[in-house]
Amino acid sequence: MAPIGTGCNAVIVKQTANVKTTFAAIPPFGFASFTVSATSVASARGGAAKPLDVAVVVDSTASMNGACGDTVPGISGTADKIDCAKEGVRTLLNGLWPCGQGFQSCSGESSLDQASLLTFPGLKDANAYTHDTTTPPLFTNDNLEFGCPGNYSSAPFWYQNSGGNGDEVQKVTVNALTFKLTFGGSSTATLTKGTTTAAVLQADLQGLSSIGAGNVSVTGGTGGPYTVTFVGNLGNQNIPAMTGTANVSITTPTAGAAYDSNGFPGWNIETSDLTYSGSPDYVITPLSNDFKTSDSSALNDSSDLVSAVNWNTCAGGTYPGNEYYGLNSRGGVSTYYAGAISAAQAELAADSARGAQPVIILLSDGDANTQSPGQCSRAVQAAQSAAAAGTWVYSVMYGQTSTSGGCSGDGSYTAYTAMKAIASDPAKFFCDPQPVGASCQTAATLNDIFVHIAEDVTTARLIG
């Protein structure tokens, strides 16, 4: 199918003038006039466009269950953050050209723009997400769901950490009148042994930005020894040892989950009859151009990618906590995005022969607060490696209200500085909302940010 119209996509304006001279006309070598000209070329958007491969990485952890504060068309009542994220991805897809600007149909045409969707936590494999939107659940519990919503239509295999050794326990013995404990660069107040109960120590530890409320439990008598168990966002993983002031000893009678050579724990499904161990698969839908049937058409609902970022009510009823099919914020494991960035770059590199401009768009609050230590550092390294290979890396810090904290056990970064360093240049770093003191691109809504990114990627590729 040929493009609509003539196929021309540029306007060339050339102007010439004959200029009479005064002093230059003096004989014997003078000349009475000369001709000057100027040429300007204006390219229409879409002219000789370089193809794009866009990998969108969306945080689907429990923090995406909160209200986003924006109105999402088609959703009555309060939209969750995951719904606003899906709306943003749909806006991006609407701005891409699956077969080249102006084509009436992509049938028989080679791909121009392709897109893929990744998420974290990862899945057992790509087939764990079946995009089904019609079958009601056959069985549900906290760990396994069959039927709608789409990503739970068969065993979802979200990576729940029931492998390894479970929650880490650290024993604190105090042989001093006063003491402090330090974890992840943050320290408690000076505590007095004779009056410090387990409840007091627990409150102080939960008050640390490196731990947070609900992430540690303390038992023991006044003055200790204290048994500190890491739970919540810090549960089911290998935790760096706390340190104490003089005459405080800290031992680890129970270590958390072990890690493989890539920093991934040994994950298992939390069910009695289904188990799986291995590294997660982050790709929900691979690179494709079936998200629209033509450059000017609406999104194609039969596309797996479009289905994954939809929010229509699941046929057969609504289900508490999972009202809409498509990608859901299942939660159960906290944020770790280093592996997802590496997976996105691998997806793009596998299509490099096409000569497309690779693009990664990461949306997350940036709180890498679980899995192996140094997740923020790993994520920055993965993003910088992708940028060095020529990938445009966009970072959208979403729902983060502070420029401090958020990178547990990784003193090199906060959530803010990590997300900022992940972007391949400052113009590609966005935040919603904009924390006080933050330097980032921002907009009124998350959807507006995706409008800006869509315009940026489709315009920047045109004239080079």
Image: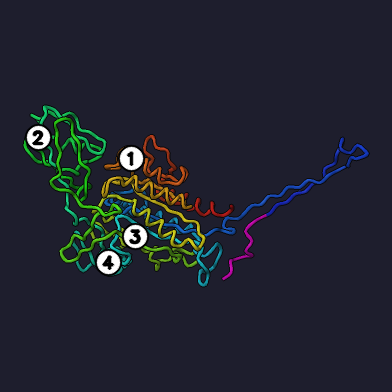
Residue 152 visible, this orientation: yes
Which residue does the numbered mark 2 point to in the structure image? 197
Residue 296 visible, this orientation: no
Category of crowding for the residue at label 4, using alpha-carbon neighbours closer than 10 angstroms: few (below 14), some (14–19), many (at least 20): many
Q: Are marks 4 and 1 in contact (CB under 8 Å)?
A: no
Residue 57 locus on image (x, y percent): 37, 54
Q: Alpha carbon of mark 4 to alpha carbon of mark 3: how far?
A: 15 Å
Under tag 4, what secondary structure?
loop
Q: Earlier in the sequence, mark 2 or mark 1?
A: 2
Category of crowding for the residue at label 1, using alpha-carbon neighbours closer than 10 angstroms: few (below 14), some (14–19), many (at least 20): many
The reply to whether the magenta stretch includes residue 104 is: no
> Where 388 sits versus 305, above or below?
above
Q: Quadrant of residue 421?
A: top left
Q: Alpha carbon of mark 2 to alpha carbon of mark 3: how far?
A: 49 Å
> Residue at image x 62%, y 59%?
9
Q: Earlier in the sequence, mark 2 or mark 3?
A: 2
Residue range in magenta is 1-11
> Where 301 sits versus 435, above or below?
below
Picture disc at residue 414: 1
Would residue 239 be found to the left or right of residue 384 on screen? left
Q: Residue furthest top?
A: 177
The reply to whether the magenta stretch includes residue 9 is: yes
Residue 255 locus on image (x, y percent): 17, 48
Under tag 3, what secondary structure?
loop
